[in-house]
Image (spheres, rainbow, N blue to C red):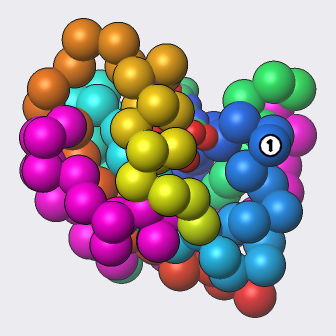
Amino acid sequence: MFVRSQITFFQRFEQDILNGSKTITIRDRSESHYQPQSIVDVFTNETQRWFAQIRILSVTPITFAQLNSQHAAQENMTLAQLQTVIREIYPNETALFVIQYELIK
Ligand SMILES: CC(=O)Nc1ccn([C@@H]2O[C@H](CO)[C@@H](O)[C@H]2O)c(=O)n1
């Protein structure tokens, strides 16, 4: 059976994803399964509303301590903002994954 791949983002990131200023997301192991070159439907976390399709470019392991200002720039944030956001979502996780994607227009 063919199952379409899906991912959710908090609604507050929708505009940055759609305008191309947010090109990575950082997730834990439970979301590290996305295959490079696969196409994924994107929904809001809050209401499960579809708002985009993305193509996965790469999935790369990273630790919290390795996050740097380049990752933050790819999130359209400062490094301090990114560290705060990740600690809110994943309070104790050290093994994270950078998922790089491009918006399908
Ligand atoms: C179900 C679930 O975990 N949803 C998530 C998890 C993460 N993120 C964002 O990805 C970046 C790095 O974590 C930051 O911009 C986060 O806010 C998100 O939008 N939605």
Tell which residue pokes out farthest to the top in this image.
92
Task: State which region is magenta.
Answer: 48-75
Residue 50: percent from left, percent from top: 83, 49
Residue 4: percent from left, percent from top: 56, 51
Please report the residue visible at 50 percent of the width from the left and 58 percent of the height from the top: 78
Position of 4 with respect to 53 (left or right) is left
Position of 49 with respect to 88 (left or right) is right
The kind of residue on which mark 1 rests is: Arg
Q: Is residue 1 visible from the viewing direction of this image?
A: no
Q: Is residue 20 visible from the viewing direction of this image?
A: yes
The one nearer the camera, 69 or 12, is: 69
Task: Give the number of marks.
Answer: 1
The image quarter containing residue 68 is bottom left
Disc 1, ligand 1: is the CB inside 8 Å? yes
Residue 40: percent from left, percent from top: 55, 60
Quadrant occupied by the C terminus: bottom right
Q: Residue 35 magenta-drawn?
A: no
Instruction: Return the residue at label 1.
Output: 12
Please report the residue visible at 72 percent of the width from the left and 29 percent of the height from the top: 45
Please report the residue visible at 39 percent of the width from the left and 23 percent of the height from the top: 87
Position of 88 with respect to 53 (left or right) is left
Residue 8: percent from left, percent from top: 63, 39
The one nearer the camera, 69 or 62, is: 69
Please report the residue visible at 47 percent of the width from the left and 71 percent of the height from the top: 73
The image quarter containing residue 58 is bottom left
Badge 1 crowding class, 10 Å Cα cut-off, few under 14, some 14 to 19, many 20 or more, is few
Q: Residue 58 magenta-drawn?
A: yes
